[in-house]
Image (cartoon, rainbow, N blue to C red):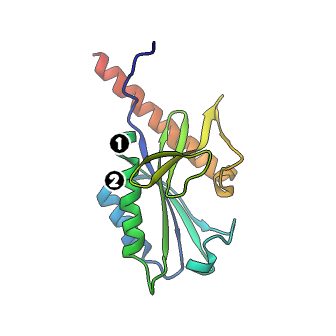
Amino acid sequence: MGTATTPDKIKPFAAITFAPEARVAEVTSALVRFFGPVDFSYGPVPFDFTDYYGDEMGKGLTKMYLTFETQAEREALADVKVFTNDLERRYAAKGRRTVNIDPGYIAADKLVLASTKDFYHRVYLSQGIFAEVTLHYRKGIYRFFSWTFPDYREPAFLEFLQRVRARYVKTVRDAHESQRG
């Protein structure tokens, strides 16, 4: 029989897709109030991988990716997604979203995203929220799955994640060493 253990805390992550008219600085400030200071960012970059959001958010979308200095418990992911859904509604205009926020986390071995949509590769958490392992880390690199979104496969984004992961792993290692005395 296995023994249950508490996993390491994770590094919060948020990807923000936004329309030209979005008040993205205010959205980012709300995320900072919720998570704490940003330590890494990637973008903004044009988001032209899909027109999935086009009907609702229009054309000329941009995306940026943020990580935060704080660490959090993995089980908070459903609450985080509920919070970001509320932010999306707060910053909507004329009944349409101007921002889409995909929260998640980075652990030593994976990048996990939260979703309100169920699918065969997603696991139910609570409150109508599901979790998806979007990338996994093995043999020194991030690897993707058939369901991984195209922008998460981009070499520049994966290099960004490598830097984030390196800092995260060092922080976790240092915390373990200080606990040992």
Which residue sits at x=50%, y=43%?
Answer: 164
| Quarter holding residue 161 | top right
Quadrant of the image for the N terminus?
A: top left
Asked if the residues shown at circle 1 and circle 2 are in contact, with their CB atoms under 8 angstroms apart, the answer is yes
Q: Where is residue 40 in the image (x, y as percent from the top left)?
A: 46, 51
Using residue 50 as the reference point, say whether residue 30 is left or right of it. Answer: left
Of the image marks 1 and 2, the number of the one nearer the N terminus: 2
* Three-letter amino acid code of the residue under disc 2: Phe
- Please identify the residue farthest to the bottom as the structure is shown: 94
Quadrant of the image for the C terminus?
A: top left
Which residue sits at x=65%, y=55%?
Answer: 149
Say which element carries label 2: helix
Which residue sits at x=66%, y=50%?
Answer: 148
Number of dots carrying numbers: 2
Q: Nearer the viewer, residue 168 or 133?
A: 133
Q: Mark 1 points at which residue?
A: 72
Which residue sits at x=41%, y=56%?
Answer: 81
